[in-house]
Amino acid sequence: MLSVRGLSAGYGSDTVLRNVDLDVGQGEIVALIGANGAGKSTLVKTLAGLIEARGGSVELEGQRIEALSPRDRVLRGLCLVPEGRQTFGGLSIETNLRLGAYAQSGLDEAAMQALIEEACTPFPILLPRRREPCANLSGGQQQMLAIARGLMSRPKVLLLDEPSLGLAPALVAEIFRLVAALREKGFAILLSEQNAKQSLAIANRAYVIENGSITMSGQAADILASADIAEKYLGVGHSVGDPASARQLAMSARLKAILQPDIV
Ligand SMILES: Nc1ncnc2c1ncn2[C@@H]1O[C@H](COP(=O)(O)OP(=O)(O)OP(=O)(O)O)[C@@H](O)[C@H]1O
Ligand SMILES: [Mg+2]
């Protein structure tokens, strides 16, 4: 669905993303995990066209999109739900939702209402409160609104940038549950997160990003198992003789370093 090859991008004279390769398939949650400042937001913003790519390609359903405007990418089915939600507290929930349909021209009011109902289906608390100011919602509910606003663009690929950021633990669990439920609707989801454990727990596959480069990738369960090994054994003097275990422990050590303080 989404296929990225050799992508690089940066700010001014700084190169941040280097030679990133990444794929997200339909009905798949792919976690993009990395520490503060690793380049997760830079990557998803470059995919969305908010930052210009300096090299490499981005394909959506087999078509190159890296030269398209952000709006044209939205119309092709790529939607970024930005870090920090970026909802408008003074506007009503419904107005926030309507903003998510900005790229689509010629929607009549009946079509808009149907779209609002569809976008809110995964988040039942939103619809009955649609006339209220967005500021009345809790942080977790505002994150739900941010995702629902994204669904207003009728996306095929969702780029979720740190949806759990700043939420209390119970709400973090709820957001991850809702993201997992979105996969069942057939979206392709790239889930950028510092919260490695919970994102790996719901993801199919994962990429680890460090200093703007992908340094590890694989099945989420394998990476999670390595993270668990790091948590259980590293730092308590555990020694393992055979090379396969040694390799896994070395990978675990790297994961531990990358994902602190989430893992340890
Ligand atoms: N607007 C900007 N101008 C210049 N440098 C930037 C800008 N935004 C980010 N950077 C730099 O790019 C690098 C990657 O930042 P980015 O925001 O992509 O990381 P991140 O993985 O999303 O981190 P976080 O988990 O804190 O959101 C960092 O070194 C950061 O300082
Ligand atoms: Mg970020």
Image (tube, rainbow, N blue to C red):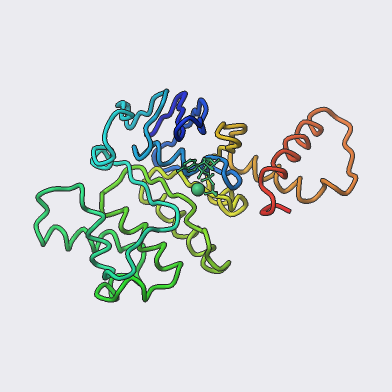
Q: How far across and how far down the image is residue 166, in percent?
A: 53, 63
**Res 45 → quadrant:** top left
Is 57 located above or below residue 32 in the figure? above
126 left or right of 251 in image: left
Front residue of 112/121: it is 112
Residue 115, percent from left and from top: 21, 58
Pick the front one: 196 or 201: 196
Q: In which quarter of the image is residue 242?
A: top right
Identified at 67% across, 43% down, the residue is 258
Q: In which quarter of the image is residue 132?
A: bottom left
**Which residue is farthest front?**
13
Q: Which residue is drawn at 26% across and 70% down?
A: 92
Determine whether 136 is above or below 195 in the image: below
**Would you say 197 lies left or right of 185 here?**
right
Depth check: 54 or 30 in front?
54
Report the quarter where the N terminus lies.
top left
Q: How many labels does the image show?
A: 0
Horizontal arrangement in the rendering, residue 179 relative to residue 261 (left or right): left
215 over 163 or under it: above or below: above
The spot of residue 50 in percent (x, y) is 35, 40
Q: Could you tell me which residue is drawn at 49 percent across and 64 percent down? A: 174
Q: In this view, does 30 lie above or below 92?
A: above
Can you give x and y, in whole percent of width and height, for residue 66 in the image? Answer: 33, 29
